Amino acid sequence: RKPLVVMTPKSLLRHPKVVSGIEEMANGEFQTLIDDTLINAEKVERIALCSGKIYYELLAKREELNEQGVALVRLEQLYPLDKETLTAIMNRYAHNKEIVWVQEEPENMGAWAYILRNLRNTDIQVIAPVSSGTPAPGTHKGFDKNQKQVIQRVFDLENLIR
């Protein structure tokens, strides 16, 4: 047996999409990665890998925009990175144009360096706030501005990074 440590912001405590049914709890198993089953893989232009609460913000924005060109793939376990499952998921989008890692932390913080090290043979880019000496801008208004910019960049398919 291994202990489970869950770190989540309060905003997800009662979020309607952050719920597992009794059947999943009784008969399911932990998934290290969760693929996007809500879209047609053939229409995907960008695969957005992410972890944590930003997934739900990206999902809400995608629903608002009715965007089908961005697949949202969740890493539920960062370490050790399940490269086998990730490769299987990526193969589903073999025709894709771009893979990005999305995080709300500045580029020089968060999981980006770890993801880059582990996927060094993959052409992957980052969408995150610019590098900073602090993990957050210090004001709620600054955080909201950064978050809005990150989310907008994920769905800006006119300006693919590569």
Image (spheres, rainbow, N blue to C red):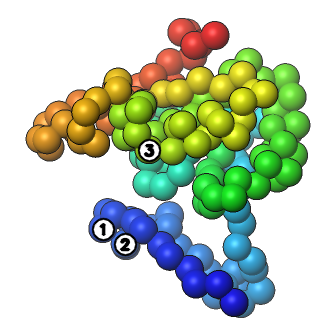
Residue 155, position as x, y percentages in the image: 51, 25
The reply to whether dot 1 and dot 2 touch (C-beta < 8 Å) is yes
| Residue 151 sits above or below residue 104 on the image | above
Question: Closest to the observer: 127 or 79?
Answer: 79
The reply to whether dot 3 and dot 1 touch (C-beta < 8 Å) is no
Mark 3 — residue?
110
The reply to whether dot 3 and dot 2 touch (C-beta < 8 Å) is no
Depth check, mark 3 against mark 1: the one in front is: 3
In the image, which disc is placed on residue 113? none
Label tally: 3
Q: CA distance from mark 1 to mark 2?
A: 5 Å
Q: CA distance from mark 3 to mark 1?
A: 19 Å
Q: CA distance from mark 3 to mark 2?
A: 22 Å
For disc 1, the neighbor class at 10 Å (few under 14, some 14 to 19, many from 20) is few
For disc 2, the neighbor class at 10 Å (few under 14, some 14 to 19, many from 20) is few
Mark 2 — residue?
13
Question: Closest to the observer: 118 or 136?
Answer: 118
Q: Amino acid at mark 2?
A: Leu
Position of the C terminus, as image quadrant, is top right
In the image, which disc is placed on residue 10? 1
Q: Earlier in the sequence, mark 3 or mark 2?
A: 2
Position of the N terminus, as image quadrant, is bottom right
Residue 89, position as x, y percentages in the image: 81, 44
The quarter holding residue 40 reads: top right
Q: Amino acid at mark 1?
A: Lys
Depth check, mark 3 against mark 2: the one in front is: 3
